[in-house]
Amino acid sequence: MNEADQLVIIPVSGLRQLSQFIRLPRQLYAGLPGYVPPLDMEQKDLLHPRKSAFFSHGRAQYFLAMRGGRPVGRISAQIDDLAIERLGENIGFFGALDAIDDAAVVSALLDAACTWLRAQGMVTARGPFTLNSNGETGIMIEGHDAPPMIAMPWHPRWLPPMIEAAGFTRAMDFLAYQMEIGPQAEEKHLVPSSLRLGEGRLGSVTTRVMRKDRMAEDGEILRGLYNDAWRNNWGSLPLTQEEMTAMVAQMKPILKPEHFVLIEQNGDPVAVALVVPNLYDIASDLGGAPSPLGWVKLAARLLRHKFHSARVILLGVSSKMEGTALGAILPALAITELMRRGKSLPYRMVEMGWVVENNMPMRRLIERLAPEPCKRYRVYDRPLTAPTD
């Protein structure tokens, strides 16, 4: 092999290589059917150590695969101290895996990540996560031709079999569902009329929107309910205060009060849902790094709220409602309220993801509205007890 064609894996060092790491997917996948690049600034919020809240409780090493001086792949290896505490074992993560259609490149990247994790004392490599389960989760298995959705990654079809060939086995699948909403959607009642919001035999059950002047306070209510509700779900990690603060700051320009559903019983918060507009609706034609004119267009579209789809990113029910009549219907009440609000918002479709494959109560509820998932993402494990070479 010509020396110039040799594959080399290098650790990312410095801002120039970090920028190259962030931009790489849109360079590798440009022109592939179904791929729409996210904005570089969105990816910087996920990956840049000075921007991502992950680094308040975790550490990471990024790697680039180089061939002939040209980047042909990337991967991250990361350790989340909160995950080790929650899961009770030394599980490290990999993520941000993107590469050309070459099994040797993918294998070398995974080996580099596993070697780094094992050197840090980890016994299992799990992923992909960018950078943990509160960020982008899994590798796309199905849904490559579905419309792109905010914070839902896209991967080429060749990556999953290459990950499996490198010794990783399936740990869990995550699903996404798309539901039609708005004035044109058929109205479907998920709960009996006698159990809908208002005064009734379940007590005073009310809902409210987000308070724009008290977003931080409402963010903490959302975080508390979400962490409580998802504490027993596979692989889930608590959202930290830093992560919620960062999420609110990043989404503030696109959030409306109606995007936040808080359900209270006798004044106490018992369930919450948060839907965010799909940034791809207004940015997909601008590329990952818009021109100055592109930024002007994006700002104008943002001001006019020119979105036609959205995503439910958080949905939770208080554990104190478990085993109660109200607790059994709260998820349906939250989704019903989102559907109702869809008649006054410009959205025609809402996507719910990620739903853990083994969360059958939630799946049965959602599948009354959307019988089949539109996307499937897979998380893999590989033991690190033996050398990879």
Image (cartoon, grey):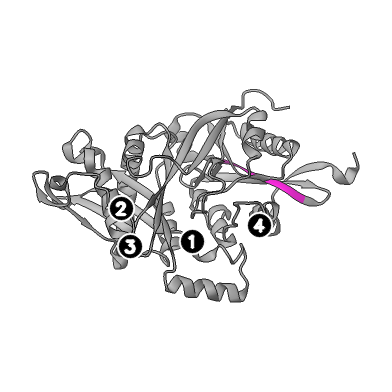
Q: Are marks 2 and 1 in contact (CB under 8 Å)?
A: no
In this figure, which residue is indicated by the disc labeled 2?
A: 186
The residue closer to the viewer here, 301 or 267, is: 301
Q: Earlier in the sequence, mark 2 or mark 3?
A: 2
386 horizontally vs 262: left or right: right
Measure the C-alpha gap from mark 3 to mark 1.
Answer: 20 Å
Q: Are marks 1 and 4 in contact (CB under 8 Å)?
A: no
Q: Are marks 3 and 1 in contact (CB under 8 Å)?
A: no
Q: Earlier in the sequence, mark 4 or mark 2?
A: 4
330 horizontally vs 157: left or right: left
**What's under tag 1, amino acid-wise?**
Leu
The picture quadrant where one finds residue 358 is: top left
Please tell me which residue is depicted at 49% across the width and 62% down the height of the picture.
281
Residue extent of the magenta highlight: 71-78
In this figure, which residue is indicated by the disc labeled 4?
A: 23
In this figure, which residue is indicated by the disc labeled 3?
A: 215
259 horizontally vs 192: left or right: right
Q: Is residue 172 visible?
A: yes
Q: Position of residue 167 (x, y in %)?
A: 64, 27
Mark toward the viewer: 3 or 1: 1
The residue closer to the viewer here, 116 or 258, is: 258
Mark toward the viewer: 4 or 2: 2
In this figure, which residue is indicated by the disc labeled 1?
A: 279
Residue 149 position (above or below residue 87) = below
**What's under tag 3, amino acid-wise?**
Met
Q: Position of residue 370 (x, y in %)?
A: 38, 44
Measure the C-alpha gap from mark 2 to mark 1.
Answer: 25 Å
Q: Quadrant of the C terminus?
A: top right
Q: Position of residue 250 (x, y in %)?
A: 46, 61
Mark toward the viewer: 4 or 3: 4
Q: Are marks 2 and 3 in contact (CB under 8 Å)?
A: no
Q: Is residue 245 visible?
A: no
